[in-house]
């Protein structure tokens, strides 16, 4: 979505502190997570420490960024326009990928799940490599408005629940995946941002 504002990330001296802090935070969260997973004597509340580190670190940075922008001028009103064909198919493709991940996340057969999950990840990698096309993620994100973002957030939450909740019936995962795909197919016909917005 940063593409529509012409935003470019450049590593400058002022960003080095931010990058190093993010790397240290990520490593600390992974180390604590390793202790939680492999040390049976680690306290039970320790499972919440990595999530809290990431939430406070990255979430705190996000809150600071939002607080800094409160005095900015309001952006111009967006004129909704039908999604271009490539962005429409890209939106449906995102729904298919997230829906398949939800279906696979609830599967109990580890070998089949691993093989199919690898295929989905390879498909996503090819899609990321093809980012310059009109179906690529930068073009799709630049054309999305709030309805598309709400569907994406809801599907990400559903995917997280399907993957994280133990002993969830496989049918629930399959229905969640089909629901995610149906939502993305429906939202692909919702008008998005015009190419010049």
Image (cartoon, rainbow, N blue to C red):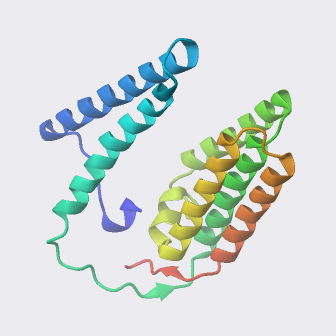
Q: x, y percentage for residue 141?
A: 48, 64
Please determine whether, in this image, residue 161 is positioned above or below residue 33: below
Would you identify the image quadrant in which residue 88 lies? bottom right
Q: Nearer the viewer, residue 74 or 195?
A: 74
Q: Quadrant of the N terminus?
A: bottom left
Q: x, y percentage for residue 186?
A: 69, 76
Q: x, y percentage for residue 30?
A: 44, 24
Q: x, y percentage for residue 74?
A: 23, 80
Please determine whether, in this image, residue 115 is positioned above or below residue 185: above
Q: Nearer the viewer, residue 105 or 56?
A: 56
How many marks the image carries: the answer is 0
Q: Nearer the viewer, residue 18 or 139?
A: 18
* Residue displayed at 55% across by 58% down: 136
* Residue displayed at 33% across by 48% down: 59
* Residue displayed at 48% across by 72% down: 143
Q: Nearer the viewer, residue 74 or 171?
A: 171
Would you identify the image quadrant in which residue 37 lies? top right
Q: Quadrant of the C terminus?
A: bottom left
Left or right, 101 with reference to 15: right
Left or right, 171 with reference to 63: right
* Residue displayed at 25% across by 29% down: 20
């Amino acid at each position: 979505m940063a593409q529509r504002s012409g935003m470019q990330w450049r590593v400058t001296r002022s960003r080095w502190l931010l990058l190093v802090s993010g790397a240290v935070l990520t490593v600390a969260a992974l180390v604590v997570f390793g202790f939680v997973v492999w040390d049976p004597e680690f306290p039970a509340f320790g499972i919440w420490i990595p999530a809290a580190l990431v939430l406070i670190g990255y979430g705190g940075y996000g809150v600071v960024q939002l607080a800094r922008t409160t005095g900015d001028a309001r952006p111009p009103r967006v004129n909704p326009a039908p999604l271009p064909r490539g962005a429409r198919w890209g939106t449906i493709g995102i729904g298919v990928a997230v829906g398949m991940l939800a279906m696979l996340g609830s599967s109990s057969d580890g070998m089949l799940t691993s093989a199919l999950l690898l295929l989905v990840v390879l498909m996503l990698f090819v899609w990321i490599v093809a980012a310059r096309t009109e179906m690529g993620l930068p073009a799709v994100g630049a054309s999305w408005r709030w309805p598309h973002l709400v569907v994406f957030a809801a599907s990400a939450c559903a995917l997280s629940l399907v993957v994280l909740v133990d002993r969830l019936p496989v049918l629930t995962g399959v229905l969640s995946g089909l629901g995610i795909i149906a939502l993305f197919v429906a939202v692909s016909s919702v008008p998005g941002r015009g190419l010049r917005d």
